[in-house]
Structures are given as C-alpha cells and as structure tokens.
Image (cartoon, rainbow, N blue to C red):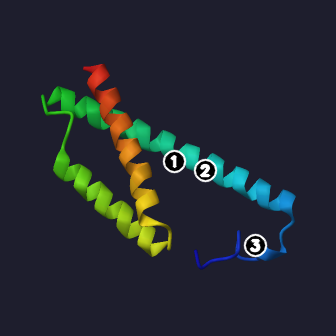
Amino acid sequence: MTDDTTDGTESIQDMTLDELREEIEDIDRGIVELIARRTYVADAVAQVKAEQNLPTTDESQEERVMERAGENADHFEVDSNLVKAIFRLLIEINKAEQRQSR
C-alpha cells in the first residue's frame, strides 16, 4: 500500500505498538462488517435465484467477481492471489449456504 497514514494526519511510522494494534482492531471490525453486508446481499441473491428457479452456481458471475477482486488488489497494491483466495472462499461459503436453503 502506498498510503502510510491512517486518517490522513498521523503516519503509521509515528504510531506506537498499541496504537497500531488498535488500528488493526478497527480495520478488522470494518472487514467483518463488510463481510456481514456482503453475506446479507448474497442471501437476497439466493432468494431471487430460488424464486426464479435459477441455478445456485453462475460461473460467469463468479469470473466477473474474481476479475474485479484482482483489479481492486492491483489498485490497492495488495497481493492479487491473496485477495482472490479470500473472494473464492466467500463465494464458496455463499454457494454452500444457497444450496442448504433450497
């Protein structure tokens, strides 16, 4: 990542260990919140698929998600393979939940 500030004012290098750990805790909460939001929307997608009698798996959509994940990783200078692995896991969990709810 090129941005070394947390809120635009304090440099990461100027933070104490406790402040850095607190920053990670805040980021982790944000990640969990985003996963929860994504899961909620994925559940709504599953309901629409069930109502329209569509298959659980949509490989072309999965490919688009993975492509976007790679592009976003590149944009934020994060390891693309790591980001794609996380998204693959999210997709597989959502698909498993969709199959169970049918």
Residue 18, position as x, y percentages in the image: 86, 57
Alpha-carbon neighbours of circle 1 within 10 Å: few (<14), some, or many (≥20)?
few
Q: Reading the chain from its start, which is encountered first: label 1 or label 3?
A: 3
Q: What numbered label is drawn on residue 60?
A: none
In the picture as drawn, the residue positioned furthest to the front comes out as 81
Distance from Cα at disc 1 to Cα at disc 2: 6 Å
Q: Marks 1 and 2: CB-CB under 8 Å?
A: yes
Q: Marks 2 and 3: CB-CB under 8 Å?
A: no
Q: Reading the chain from its start, which is encountered first: label 2 or label 3?
A: 3
Horizontal placement of 41 versus 63: left or right? right
Identify residue for label 1.
Answer: 34
The residue under label 1 is which amino acid type? Answer: Leu
Residue 49, position as x, y percentages in the image: 20, 33
Q: Marks 1 and 3: CB-CB under 8 Å?
A: no
Identify residue for label 3.
Answer: 12
Residue 42, position as x, y percentages in the image: 35, 39
For the residues carrying marks 2 and 3, which lies nearer the camera in this image?
3
Residue at (39, 50) in percent of width and height? 87
Horizontal placement of 89 versus 35: left or right? left
For the residues carrying marks 1 and 3, which lies nearer the camera in this image?
3
